[in-house]
Image (cartoon, helix red, strand yellow):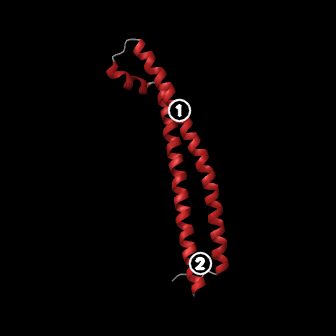
Amino acid sequence: MMAEVSGQDLDLELRDKLRLLDISLREFGKRGRAYAEAERDYRVEMAKKVLIERAGGQPVTIISDICRGDAEIAKLRFKRDVAEVDYKAAQEAINSYKLQIKILEAQRAREWGA
């Protein structure tokens, strides 16, 4: 059985979710920039490493594997992947808060209609 929730409680909870959504939107922007920077850093270093390997006479067919196995390149790729996960997690948080807000608004509308 669901506990009775007052209109005031719904308003407070709705305001709290809107505040969390606002925070999440700002964080989403920060994480998006961090992801873009990590992607840029990875690609730039990967390109440099590819050029070094090609100049060194490595067969083209294995250069990509050799470069991805380089410790610095692997570290940058890891940072990029972590930044991507953080970015997607922030996006999911936004979607979750939006859904919670819709549910609270519907609940408040039902209460006002009652």
Q: Is residue 32 above or below residue 37?
A: below
Element type where label 1 sits in the image: helix
Q: Is residue 84 above or below residue 73?
A: below
Q: Residue at x 59, y 78 (%)?
A: 108
Q: Is residue 107 above or below residue 32?
A: below
- Label 2 Cα neighbours within 10 Å, binned few <14 / some 14-19 / many ≥20: many
Q: Please state which amino acid type lies under the numbered disc 1.
A: Arg
Q: What label does residue 101 carry, if any? A: none
Q: Residue at x 43, y 21 (%)?
A: 50
Element type where label 2 sits in the image: helix
Q: Residue at x 57, y 68 (%)?
A: 101
Q: Is residue 64 left or right of residue 28?
A: left
Residue 67 image offset from top left, x and y in percent: 42, 24
Choose between 70 and 112: the one closer to the eye: 112
Q: Please state which amino acid type lies under the numbered disc 2.
A: Arg
Q: Residue furthest bottom?
A: 114
Residue 74 image offset from top left, x and y in percent: 47, 30
Decide which of tag 2 and tag 1 comes sooner along the chain. 1
Quadrant of the image occupied by residue 22? bottom right
Q: Residue furthest top?
A: 56
- Label 1 Cα neighbours within 10 Å, binned few <14 / some 14-19 / many ≥20: some
Quadrant of the image occupied by residue 59? top left
Q: What label does residue 40 carry, if any? A: 1
Disc 2 marks which residue?
Answer: 108
Decide: marks 2, 1 in contact (CB < 8 A)? no
Q: Quadrant of the C terminus?
A: bottom right
Residue 90 image offset from top left, x and y in percent: 55, 52
Q: Residue at x 53, y 47 (%)?
A: 87
